[in-house]
Amino acid sequence: MQRNIGDLDWDSTCGTYMKAVDLPEGGATLTISDVAQVEVRDTKARRDDAVKSAWAITWREDGWRPLILNTTLKKVLRALCGPTIGDAIGRQITIYNDQSVALGRQTVGGVRILGAPWLDGDVQIEIQPNPRKRPERVTLRRTGPPARKAAAAGPVEPPAETIEAWAARKGFALPDVDSALAAGGKPALASIPKARHPSAIAWLEGEGKLFLAQAADARTTTTTDQTGD
């Protein structure tokens, strides 16, 4: 997504990093391209030139400035994507201007994570940005299209009977089944896909019944001749 100057609010900033006022009403869903360590001004230090290290997200979409991650954002990303920075790379998240964010006694607004389009549904997490304060419960929203409902489950069909199970139930030896299939010009048992077993069974119980009986008789005769000596 390419952002144009004409899309920006008059209060938008022109600095190096994203501010809450840069976000459009309703927020923006962006893809995390990378997370890099940067040097930023340390506003808590007494010296104006004091700097500190911070993590900054860069985006895959064009026209969006990097976002510096504060403690709250990092903890939400950990709960949302996983414990390591690599877990977040390539993920889409939805960020917005939370105008209730306060700095001291003044409400100034701040960038917050609304959720992600890949969530199955709304998720509640608990974070504690400041150890001196109570943990906060945050609801992360599914920001993508509504999840498609699964089709209503119908009656479960029992698995089709295999030729082996059918032969065992009927009392037929598998070599007789193979001989009957060969006599009828059918594929060997070992080469018949499981999906074709029901139709093979139907043939054995119909047209192949005679071949099956002949195979069983031939095997019985051969066995008798061998034991009769």
Image (cartoon, grey):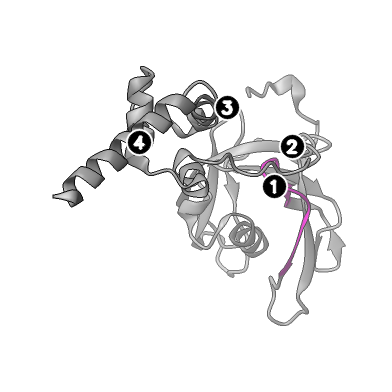
Circle 3 residue = 62
Residue occupying image coordinates x 38% and y 26%: 181
Residue 144 got which mark? 2
**Which circle's residue, 1 or 3, is located before the other in the chain?**
3
Give the x, y percent position of residue 195.
51, 31
Circle 1 residue = 119
Residue 217 got which mark? 4
Q: Nearer the viewer, mark 3 or mark 4?
A: 4
Residue occupying image coordinates x 31% and y 42%: 220
Q: Nearer the viewer, mark 2 or mark 3?
A: 2
Could you say which quadrant of the image residue 139 lies in? bottom right
Residue 51 is at least partly visible in this image: yes
Span highlighted in magenta in the image = 112-126
Q: Nearer the viewer, mark 1 or mark 4?
A: 4
Sort mark 2 into few (<14), some (14-19) or many (20+) by Cα contacts within 10 Å: some
Sort mark 3 into few (<14), some (14-19) or many (20+) by Cα contacts within 10 Å: few
Sort mark 1 into few (<14), some (14-19) or many (20+) by Cα contacts within 10 Å: some
